Image: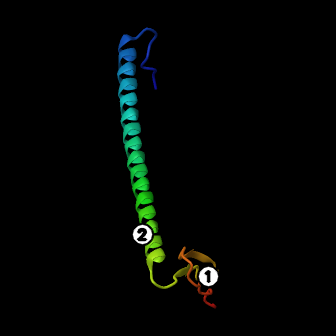
């Protein structure tokens, strides 16, 4: 196979410059798209965190304002997860 490039071949240099520019634009396009996906993922993560915090606050309000004592235990460990903050009698953890 013969080498198509010769010293000082302006056509080769021009083609190389065009290809390099096109490759750089394509890479930049991929980077821009990737960043957009990351931004969207970050937005969804933050929205989920806000939603979880609102749900937890709502649950705690229900527990705190209930007329009876309420406690939530982890089923596997029996550990107390949440309880009413008022002076009600606290139930014991359920026996497995």
- Residue 95, above or below 38: below
Which residue is drawn at the image coordinates 60% and 89% (left, top)? 94
Residue 41, how many percent across, how many down? 41, 51
Q: How is the image coloured?
A: rainbow
Local SS, label 1 = loop
- The residue closer to the viewer here, 62 or 67, is 67
- The residue closer to the viewer here, 70 or 38, is 70
- Residue 28, above or below 42: above
The image quadrant that residue 21 belongs to is top left
Identify the residue position indicated by label 2 in the image: 58
- The residue closer to the viewer here, 22 or 43, is 43
Local SS, label 2 = helix
Q: Is residue 60 left or right of residue 81?
A: left
Identify the residue position indicated by label 1 in the image: 76
Residue 59, how many percent across, how many down? 45, 72
Residue 80, how many percent across, how many down? 61, 77
- Residue 93, above or below 18: below
- The residue closer to the viewer here, 41 or 91, is 91
The quadrant the C terminus occupies is: bottom right
Dot 1: few (<14), some (14–19), or many (≥20) neighbours within 10 Å? Answer: few
Which residue is drawn at the image coordinates 46% and 26% (left, top)? 1
């Amino acid at each position: 196979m013969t080498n198509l490039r010769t010293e000082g071949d302006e056509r080769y240099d021009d083609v190389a410059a065009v290809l390099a520019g096109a490759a750089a634009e394509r890479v930049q396009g991929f980077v821009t798209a990737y960043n957009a996906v990351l931004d969207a993922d970050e937005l969804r993560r933050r929205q989920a965190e806000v939603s979880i915090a609102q749900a937890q606050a709502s649950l705690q309000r229900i527990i705190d304002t209930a007329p009876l004592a309420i406690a939530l235990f982890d089923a596997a460990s029996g550990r107390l997860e949440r309880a009413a903050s008022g002076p009600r009698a606290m139930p014991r953890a359920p026996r497995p």
